[in-house]
Image: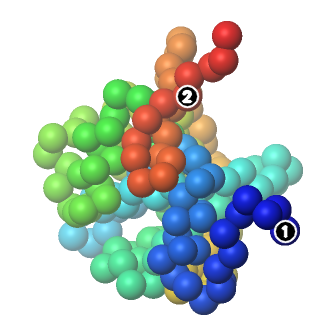
Amino acid sequence: MDNDMISFAPTDGRALRSAFGRFGTGVTVITTFTESGPLGMTANSFSSVSLDPPLVLWSAALRSKRHDAFANAKHYCIHILGEDQQDVAHHFATQGHDFSDFGWTKGADGAPQLSGCLAAFHCERFAVHPAGDHSLIVGQIRHAAERPGEGAGLLFDQGRFGTFKPKT
């Protein structure tokens, strides 16, 4: 181990969360359509898995009130947020039923697609795996869309939102 690093037990949840926070990630909002209407959830635990078949994964906390709806959803849409969509990320991080401030359309499989995002992946549930205090939700992409032109993604790093600034 580096001498300039501070060691901690992996059971120290606060320290572990802080160390995980050193890994900057993109920000997504996942949406699905339920019996009560559209539902959304902010997540930064998104990753591509496979190109053939086209698979992606994200994770939902078991303690989330929206966990079961997403773990059981047959279809959902993952939205890659742009740097100008911090309000969308905050909104769906705290509540998921109110879509009134955001433009959206119903996708071919029924999942809501938010307007203005950098990319959207309409997925069909491929697998859900238990993983500690989360579920890993794997989806097979059935339709994908990308906003034309340039646009920086919204990033989450050390508990803050921001963007990538390339070195010159």
> Is 48 displayed left or right of 21 in the figure?
right
Eyeballing the image, is 40 above or below 136?
A: above
Q: Distance between the Cα atoms at labels 2 and 1?
A: 29 Å
| Residue at the image point whose x is 57% and y is 79% from the top | 135
Q: Quadrant of the C terminus?
A: top right
- Residue 20 in sight in this render: yes
Q: Position of residue 141 (x, y in %)?
A: 65, 51
The residue singled out by tag 1 in the image is 1
| Residue at the image point whose x is 54% and y is 58% from the top | 21
Q: Where is residue 30 in the image (x, y as percent from the top left)?
A: 44, 55
| Residue at the image point whose x is 82% and y is 47% from the top | 51
Judged by depth in the image, the label closer to the viewer, 2 or 1, is 1
Eyeballing the image, is 49 above or below 101?
A: below
Residue type of the residue flagged with mark 1: Met
> Is 100 displayed left or right of 146 in the figure?
left
Residue type of the residue flagged with mark 2: Phe
Q: In which quarter of the image is the N terminus?
A: bottom right
> Is 15 displayed left or right of 40 in the figure?
right
Q: Position of residue 104 (x, y in %)?
A: 29, 39
- Residue 113 in sight in this render: no
Task: Using the image as rendered, state which of residue 16 and residue 155 is in the foreground.
Answer: 16
> Is 4 displayed left or right of 57 in the figure?
right
The reply to whether discs 2 and 1 touch (Cβ–Cβ < 8 Å) is: no
Disc marking residue 164: 2
| Residue at the image point whose x is 44% and y is 71% from the top | 70
Disc marking residue 126: none
Task: Using the image as rendered, state which of residue 89 and residue 160 is in the foreground.
Answer: 160
